[in-house]
Structures are given as structure tokens and as C-alpha cells.
Amino acid sequence: MRKYVIMGVQGSGKGTQSELLAADLDIVHISVGDIFRWNVQNHTKIGAQVRRVMAAGELVGDDLVESVVQSRLTGHDWNFGFIIDGFPRNRRQAEFFLESYDIDAIITLDLPDSEVRRRVLNRRLCADCGINYNLIDDSPAVPGQCDACRGELTTREDDTEEALAVRLKTYHEKTNPVLELFGRKEYVVTADARPAPEVVQAEIRRKLSLPPQKQQESQENASA
Ligand code: ADP
Ligand code: ZN
């Protein structure tokens, strides 16, 4: 059983790295932001409570976040473990989490703020299948349309200059102290988030002493 937390500023690739690791290790990826976005899209009661807060780039209240995380984790489809992204984001959430779960490692993705702005403001998301695009180096063949499913590409409501400024400020003020707290108790590994996703993934694995990605192994074998 493996239990990981992944942390990093907006646009650092937490979702992408979590998915790569989760698929390979057969663990569950839990994204608190995705859970809230799902609730907003599906007009649930939780969605109504968080929509404005999220759009403004502010943090959802701790009580609500903790109950969402707890119910997701007691949902029990993580027999081989989990990787959680977007939680904890402040000291209180971290203390709540450490009381209940024994974490194997905290993965942190490092990205300078200048690169964050460039990535986040150019990020587009397929409304149908959820694939991420980046208009700088990963733009779709047809503008505004998903290559995989032809769905419409949308911008996250909180990927605006204003909301991003709030999110970054909150990250530095509230989430950085969580890293200090974890650093004292748990195993923290840091990866440079600037290179391509596969390179970042390889660094994470090396630092966690995990074998290289299965897919990469077979590619290497094929070219050997
Ligand atoms: P990002 O890391 O890019 O800001 P996420 O998708 O992780 O985006 O989260 C989107 C939004 O969801 C946050 O800005 C916040 O409003 C809310 N949210 C997610 N996780 C938490 C959390 N642990 N505590 C409070 N609010 C949260
Ligand atoms: Zn799509």
C-alpha cells in the first residue's frame, strides 16, 4: 500500500504527474479540485457552495474540504493506495490529515511563478474528455477543438489573471508552511517541474526509489 501527497503551485503538473504514477502503480488519484469542479458542473449543493469561492481563486472552507476528503477516502477503492492532489493546503488541513493517515511521501513540484503564469493562462481543457492542452507547445490541430474527441476546448473559470494572482499568493502564504510541517515529520521529495512530463515523472520515480515507468521500459526495449 502506498500513500502519497503531491504538492506544487498552479500549473506545475500535479494532475498529470499523479495520473502517470497512479496508472502505473494501480493506485487511486484523488484531486480535490476535480471533485469540486465535478460538483459545480453537476449543480450539486456542494457545487453551489464552492462555485464563487473557486472562481475568485480563494480556498474553500476547511470543514467542507475535510468532509469531502474524508468521504472520498472512506469510499474504499484504494486497496493499493492513493495519491492525493490539492490537499492539504494549509496548516489545519495538514494536521487533520496527519492524524488520520500515514503518508509514505510528499512529492513537491517546483516551478517559478513566471512559468506558472505562462502555463496557466494558456491552458485549455476539453469540456468532454478532460484532456489538457497548452496553447504554447501543445496546441490542438484545429483551434478550439479537442484532437482526441473533437470536444470544445474551454478555459477554467479560475484561470484568469486576477484569480491566478489570488491563488499564487494563497499558495505561498498558506501552503508553503504545510511543506515545512511535512518536512519535519515525513519524507519530502522535490522534482523540477520545468521539463517535459516524462522527464519530471522519471525524476519523481528516481527519488522515490520506484522502478522506471513501464511504458518507457518497453520503448527502450523496442529501440534496443
Ligand atoms: P490549483 O492548484 O490549480 O489552484 P485545484 O484544481 O487544485 O487548482 O483547485 C481549484 C480550487 O478548488 C482552489 O482554488 C480552491 O478554491 C478549491 N480547493 C481545492 N483544494 C482545496 C483545499 N484543500 N482547500 C481549500 N480549497 C480547495
Ligand atoms: Zn476531448
Image (cartoon, rainbow, N blue to C red):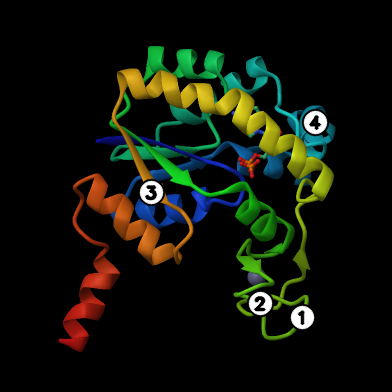
Q: Quadrant of ligand 2?
A: bottom right
* Mark 3 or 2, closer to the camera: 3
* Mark 1 vs 3, N-terminal side: 1
Mark yes or no: residue 126 visible. no
Query: Which of 98 and 127 lies nearest the eye of the viewer?
Result: 98
Q: Are marks 2 and 4 in contact (CB under 8 Å)?
A: no
Q: Amino acid at mark 4?
A: Val
Marker disc for residue 143: 1
Mark yes or no: residue 128 visible. yes
Disc 4 element: helix
Q: What residue did someone put label 4 on?
A: 53
Quadrant showing the C terminus: bottom left
Q: Are marks 1 and 4 in contact (CB under 8 Å)?
A: no
Q: What residue did someone put label 3 on?
A: 191
* Mark 3 vs 4, N-terminal side: 4
Q: Amino acid at mark 1?
A: Pro
Q: Amino acid at mark 3?
A: Ala
What is the total number of numbered labels drawn onto the structure image? 4
Residue 1's x, y, as percent? 24, 36
Q: Residue at x 62, y 64 (%)?
A: 132
The correct choice, above or below, for 20 with respect to 72 in the image is below
CA–CA distance between discs 2 and 4?
29 Å
Residue 201's x, y, as percent? 36, 57
* Mark 2 vs 4, N-terminal side: 4
* Label 2: few (<14), some (14–19) or many (≥20) C-alpha neighbours in 10 Å: some
Q: What residue did someone put label 2 on?
A: 139
The correct choice, above or below, for 99 with respect to 105 in the image is above
Q: Are marks 2 and 1 in contact (CB under 8 Å)?
A: yes
Disc 3 element: strand
* Mark 1 vs 4, N-terminal side: 4
Query: Which of 158 and 167 lies nearest the eye of the viewer?
Result: 167
